[in-house]
Amino acid sequence: MLTFKTAGESHGKGVMAIVDGLPAGVKVDFARINEKLARRQQGYGRGGRMKIETDRVEVFSGLRHGKTIGSPVGLLIHNKDWENWQGVMSVDKDTNPTEKEVVIKKDGRIRKIDKEVTRPRPGHADLAGVLKYQQDDIRNILERASARETAARTAVGGLLDNFLHYFDIEIISHVIQLGEIESCSPEVGLAELKAGIRDSELACYDQDKEREMKEYIDRIKEKGDSLGGVVELRTSPLPVGLGSHVQWDRRLDGELAQAILSIPAVKGVEIGPAFENSSRTGHDVHDEIFYQPDKGYYRKTNRAGGLEGGITNGEPLIIRMAMKPIPTLYRPLRSVDIKTKEPFTASIERSDVTALPAAGVVGEAMLAFILARAMLVKFGGDSIRETINNYRGYLEMID
């Protein structure tokens, strides 16, 4: 079974991941991983952290001469900002326990920060986390709950893209809604969609809508507020038969929903136009089935989003993920100090106006993991050659 775990804090030494279960012999293009990491840091509306970090992956296990060897693959991304936070985030004892503030260089400026955080921010894991883990310093929660952890997930997705490449499976994300501004999902192929968003700062296919979105971001930024929206994930056509209908926890749609909802600030997911379909009749929703000897079974529509009964049906997978506005605001909301119980405005950590395009890249990574795992559950193999042979034999069998 393909698995991965991540570790690391937002202002610690770095973030890391261990990927276990990849077959031996997979060629790994490091540029593919680093390109994903770069895309996660881009996007109109990002904050100061993106000016500090330039993420690049370091592989410290599981590869030899550019190929996987069947053992766990270790991935590490160093935090460049660590040099400014060593005192605050030391894994050893506090060298200056009497100091309440620490001076650090932040965004190129000298700034004092509180060593101890006691004011929980609404919308974060701050309060629930300190209560659950019996902590008296919110930094012990917010450092791990931070979206910085998704850099490790993105590296995992880039690694697994190398595996999916053997089966011509490609994944792309694009923004179809930012706040109150909606852009329709374009009815174009994957290659045209990819080309259309290549130079977009918001990964939006519609250039006119993108201009509106950027102006909207500027207005919201002046107000010290934040924005959410909707990202659509698409794949190339998938092989029939990934997932299963026989148990609830083997249905692929359930696995996908859990993976996508695990992304920070993502609060909703739909496969295909699910919410739109819910208001229509069956004749308007279900995809009719056709057959031709030269192409086999096919559908002229894909309103199911590529899944029926928890199983891929041969069509492209289409998923939409809804992201709430980022809860760290430069115009803070009201909160209560966990020590004094006195009311305060919530403390401010470095933040973005929106990270919607970046969330899409993380969505690609989580989708890559679920699809790679489903491929290995279906076709197995301790080496990539064995997996490919099993895959080809299956396609011949169902042809």
Image (tube, rainbow, N blue to C red):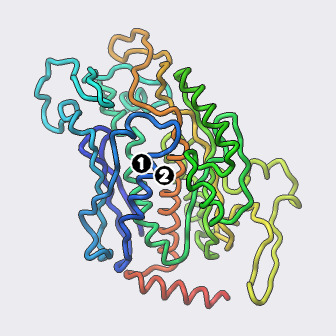
Query: In the rendered view, does 68 fall on the left or right side of 381?
Result: left
Residue marked by disc 2: 362
Could you say where residue 359 lies in the image, as x and y percent from the top left? 52, 46
**What secondary structure is marked by label 1?**
helix
Evaluate if marks 2 and 1 touch, with contact meaning CB atoms under 8 Å apart.
Answer: yes
Looking at the picture, how far across and down is residue 296, in whole percent?
74, 84
Position of residue 43 in the picture relative to residue 16 (left or right): right
Q: Residue at x 58, y 53 (%)?
A: 257
Instruction: Identify the residue under disc 1.
Output: 150
Q: What kind of element bears circle 2?
A: helix
Mark number, residue 368? none
Amino acid type at mark 2: Val
Percent position of residue 189, x then y? 68, 66
Is residue 131 among what the camera can see?
yes
Q: Nearer the viewer, residue 1 or 345?
A: 345
Mark 2 Cα shell of 10 Å, populated few (<14), some (14-19), many (≥20): many
Image quadrant occupied by the N terminus: bottom left
User: In the picture shown, does residue 164 fall above or below 180?
Assistant: below
Q: Position of residue 72 (x, y in %)?
A: 30, 67
The residue nearer to you, when weighing 105 against 243, is 105
Q: CA distance from mark 2 to mark 1?
A: 7 Å
Amino acid marked by disc 1: Thr
Q: Residue at x 75, y 89 (%)?
A: 294
Q: Earlier in the sequence, mark 2 or mark 1?
A: 1
Q: Is residue 126 shown left or right of residue 70?
A: right
